[in-house]
Structures are given as C-alpha cells and as structure tokens.
Image: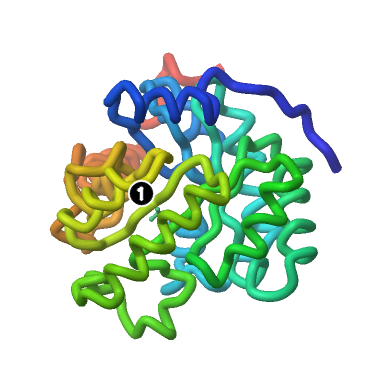
Amino acid sequence: MSVESKVRSVTTATLAKMKHDGEKIAMLTAYDFTMAKIVDGAGIDLILVGDSAANVMAGHTTTLPITLDEIIYHASSVVRGVERAFVVVDMPFGTCSGDEKTALDAAIRIMKETGADGVKIEGGEEMLPCIKKVLAAGIPVMGHLGLTPQSIHQLGGYGLRAKEEAEAAKLLHDAQLLSEAGCFGLVMEKIPAALAERVTKSVAIPTIGIGAGAGCNGQVLVVHDMLGMNKGFKPKFLRQYADLHTIMTEAIGRYVGDVKEGSFPNAAEQY
Ligand code: KIV
C-alpha cells in the first residue's frame, strides 16, 4: 500500500545549509501521530522514527525485536502528523545484515508505505554496500556510529564507545566513508565529545549527537526520556525538560479518585 508522498519544508538541502551556516539542528524521536504533531509544531527540524520504539512503545529490553511491518506502522502514523520536519526512519535490525537487495527492498517499503523522507542505517564500512544500494535508488540515508544498539550483543553493553584509539580511528574513517558515499547526516551515539567534534570538523555532512557532546552540528534525544516519562532512566547525557511521569500519574490518580467518589461526570459533563 502506497501513501501520499510530499516534500516537507526541511529537506536534506536545508540540513546541509544549517551545517554550513553554523545553525544547530534539533532532532527528537516520535513513534505516533499525536506526539509527532506536538514535536513538529514545536519547531523540531528532524524527527526520527527510531527502532527505540521497541523499548519505549513495546517494552522490549533491546531494539532487536522490532519488525519492518511494525516500524512502518509507527512511521506512517508519525508522517500523518508532520508538516515541517524531515522524517527519518530506522531500518530495523536484520534488514541490512544480508544482501543489498534485501536492504533496498526494506527501504523502498518504508518510503512507499510511510511517506517518510529517508532512512537511518546503523554501522560503518561493513554496511557500505547496503547503504550505497539504497542511496542509488534516490533514498536519503543517515548513518549511525558509536554505540549502535542493534549490535548490543556484540558490544556487550550500553557503555561509552570509542574510548580507545583503535576504535576512535575506525569511527573517524567510517564517518568519512559515509560522508563520501552521500549520506545526508550522521548520528553519533555515546562517544567522547572531543572525538565527535573531530569527526564533525572532518566530514561534509551534518552530525547529530546523543551523548556525544556539544561539538556536533545537532542533538537528538528520545522524546519520552527528555519529557521525563521514563522514570528510572537518567544517563549523564540526558537533560530532562519536564517531569511528565509525575504530572500524568497525579492527573490519572485524580481521575480515579473522581470516578470512585462519583464526582465525575458532573451535571455539565453529561447529555
Ligand atoms: O532509535 C533511536 O531512538 C535512535 C536514537 C538513540 C538516535 O537511534
């Protein structure tokens, strides 16, 4: 099933110009229509339909279980709520692990069935054949280096990446390859700020950091985390802009109380 595909106000050209002009890029995740409408209306530049939906929306402990059909469901809901921002969708775990044609087929389904603007693919040099195949079809691709949660079983944990020189050098090399291949942007997750700044200065494309310091061209956070909906989760890089967990718990508690005591609905709230 294809959906209407339109070019929104923020494009890959807009993002490239923002890097050129030194204007910072603000990016957040969204997984549903209502949140996407709020995030877009607040002036965000880039919306990521992240595979973190597996954690945030479905309660899985890793991002691995989300399927192509599921990410397409989330992304098509998000796109219906967005007028301005560029919408990029994660290619789920496994879609880029095999041959290039499988990756291309998955990316084409995402573009056709959601109306999104591009896809994000985790990994560096080892993913280049798939990335190039998707790019050759005219689909914008964003890279993702550093902590790549789809490889969590190989990485062995969610700690800081590229602390050692060898891993830092590979990351810098991978970033250059992704930039030269034609990716429109690069997410760098949980790496030292000095390395992220070095990468940002050495590649032509905008870099977006999460736990990668202030030297990136932009920042991304998981929207539920920055709104304080995920109570126990407070890594050092996360700035919490609201305490929605407390606000929602209190509001729902008052509703429960009102229903129990019979004060809701009142005379004005019924037909
Ligand atoms: O899926 C996601 O939310 C992400 C961000 C952490 C960048 O990839």
Number of labelled discs?
A: 1
- Across and down, in percent, residue 7 comes to 65, 22
Look at the image and tell me whether residue 118 can be seen: yes
Up-down: is 150 above or below 52?
below
Residue at 59 percent of width and 63 percent of height? 128
The amino acid pointed to by label 1 is Val
Question: Ligand 1 within 8 A of label 1's CB?
Answer: yes
Q: Residues within 10 Å of mark 1 (few under 14, many from 20)?
A: some
Residue at 59 percent of width and 21 percent of height? 8
Up-down: is 244 above or below 131?
above
Up-down: is 16 above or below 197?
above
Position of 46 with respect to 223 (left or right) is: right
**Image quadrant where one finds the C terminus:** top right
Look at the image and tell me whether residue 256 can be seen: no
Say which residue label 1 marks: 222
- Across and down, in percent, residue 214 comes to 17, 43
Question: In terms of image quadrants, where is residue 27?
Answer: top left
Instruction: Say which element carries label 1.
Output: loop
* Viewer-nearest residue: 190 or 167: 167
* Viewer-nearest residue: 144 or 35: 144
